[in-house]
Image (cartoon, rainbow, N blue to C red):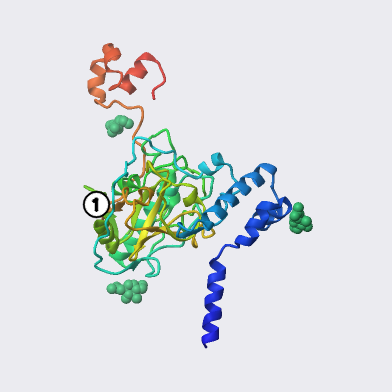
Amino acid sequence: MRVFLILALLTVLCAAAVDMKKYKRALKNDSRLRKLYIEKFGAADLTSEKLTNFKEALQFVVNQNENPNIGWESDVNFFAPRSQEERNDILLKPDTSTGYDVSGLTFPLGSNAEDEVDWVSAGYISEVQDQTVDCRACWAFAALAALEGRYQILTNKSVEFSEQELIDCVYWVEDRAQDGCYGGHFADVFKFLAKFGHLASESSAPYSSSVGSCSYGAVENALTDAHLDGSKSYSLVSYDDQTLIDTLLDGPIATAVQTTQAFLFYSSGVLRDDTCTSLIPNHAVALVGYNANSFRVKNSWGTNWGDGGYMKVARGHHGCGMIFYGVIPNLVEGAPTTKDITKPPKCNDTWGASFCSNYLDYCQYYMAYCKKSCSEKLGIACE
Ligand SMILES: *[C@@H]1O[C@H](CO)[C@@H](O)[C@H](O)[C@H]1NC(C)=O
Ligand SMILES: *[C@@H]1O[C@H](CO)[C@@H](O)[C@H](O)[C@H]1NC(C)=O
Ligand SMILES: *[C@@H]1O[C@H](CO)[C@@H](O)[C@H](O)[C@H]1NC(C)=O
C-alpha cells in the first residue's frame, strides 16, 4: 500500500515536472533542438524563424525554472514558436488610459471566512475552452465564467452560455468600429444582457473563433431563470483582499490582467509576477476560487496551456492587475424581458421628422439632428 502511494506520488511529480535536462541539452545542440520542436509541435510548418522563436522561449523557460527565487514553473507552449507580434494576436490592444502605479503599495491579506473556495471542483465552472489565436475574445470567456458560475449558484441550473452570440452582437448593436474578435470588455456583456435579455446556449451557438452575423431571433434563449439587473447590470469589485475573497465566496469574478512572458509560459505553481509594472491590461480571465495564499484563475487558451487551462496567482500581490479590474454581473431571479437584438438606425431624425420637415432650409445647422430628412433633401448618402 505504502509503495503504491509513493509510486503514485512520484508519477504525479514527474508528470508535472519539466524535463530540464532535455531542454538544456536542446539549447546546446541544434539537432536536438529541432527534434524537441518536432516532438512538441510537429514538423509540418517548421521554419527557421519558428525554431529561433522556440529557442528563445526555451531559454526563457530554463532561466525561469532555474531561478531559485521563482515559486512557479514555466514551460514551452503554443506561444513558443510565435514571434512577439504573433503572440499579440491573441491579446487585447492595451488601453493606455488605464493602469495603476503600484510602487510602494502592499496588499495585506484579509481574514478568511472560509479557508478556501474552489468553484471548479464544486462543479460551477464549465470546461476550459480555446479562444484560439484568430480571435481576441477573452472578454467574452471571462464574462461567461463569472455569469455561468453565478447563474448556477442563484438558480441551481448549470448552463453553458454562448460566447459566439456575444462576439457577434455586443459591439454590432453599438455600431462601434471594432468587432468582437478585435477585442472588448466583459462589463459590456452584462450591459448588453440587461438590455436584450437573450443569450443562446453554447450548444445552439458554438464558438467559431470568428465574427458572424448577429441573427439570434430564432435561437432559443438559455437565460431563463435569472436576468441582469436593468438599473445596475454589473458591479466593480474593490481591490482589497478582504472584498475580493468575500466576493469570491458569492461566486466567480471576471477580471483583466497585463500579461508578461512569465504569464504566457506559466505551467504550474503560484505565479507572483513582478515584471509587469504599469498594469495596463491586455487580457481578461476569471477568478474562480482562493486558498490561503493564492487565487485560482480560469483562462481561455485551451487545456494544454498552464495547469490544465488554469493558473494560480499569489494573494498579497497585485496579480498584474487582476486584483484591480474585477467585475461581477448583478443577477436577479426571474425570467428576463427579452427585446429583439437590433441596431438603432444610423440614419434617422433624432429630433423627429416633424421638427426636421419644418427646418429643411436650415440643414446646414440641423444636419446632425435631421440626418434622414436633410440627406433626402440634399440628395446625399445618409449615414
Ligand atoms: C547533437 O545531438 C546528436 C543527437 O541528437 C548527436 O548525434 C550529436 O553528436 C550532437 N552534436 C554535438 C555537437 O554535440
Ligand atoms: C440542484 O440541482 C441538483 C441537480 O440538478 C439536484 O440534485 C438538487 O436537488 C437541486 N437542489 C435544489 C436545492 O433544488
Ligand atoms: C436615432 O439614432 C440615434 C443614434 O444612433 C439613436 O440614439 C436614436 O435612438 C435613434 N432614434 C430613433 C427614433 O430611432
Q: Position of residue 240 (x, y in %)?
A: 25, 53
Q: Can residue 215 be seen in this view?
A: no
- Other residues around mark 1 within 10 Å, as few (<14) / some (14–19) / many (≥20): some
Between 371 and 31, the one nearer to me in the picture: 31
Identify whether 5 is placed above or below 123. Answer: below
Between 323 and 283, the one nearer to me in the picture: 323
Identify whether 314 is placed above or below 57. Answer: below
Looking at the image, residue 24 sits to the left or right of residue 243; the answer is right
Q: Position of residue 72 (x, y in %)?
A: 47, 59
Residue 200 sits in which quadrant?
bottom left
Q: Name the kind of residue labelled 1 in the image.
A: Asp
**Residue drawn where x is 38% and y is 55% of the image:** 286
Residue 153 sits in which quadrant?
bottom left
View extreme (top): residue: 361
View extreme (front): residue: 68
Between 52 and 380, the one nearer to me in the picture: 52
Q: Where is residue 280 in the image (x, y as percent from the top left)?
A: 38, 41
Judge: label 1 CB < 8 Å from ligand 3: no
Q: How many marks?
A: 1
Between 294 and 202, the one nearer to me in the picture: 294
Quarter holding the C terminus is top left
Q: Position of residue 308 (x, y in %)?
A: 50, 62
Question: For ligand 1, which image quadrant applies?
Answer: bottom right
Identify whether 87 is placed above or below 240. Answer: above
Q: Is residue 122 visible?
A: yes
- Label 1 secondary element: loop
Residue 94 sits in which quadrant?
top left
**Residue drawn where x is 24% and y is 25% of the image:** 351
The residue indicated by pointer 1 is 229
**Residue drawn where x is 41% and y is 45% of the image:** 276
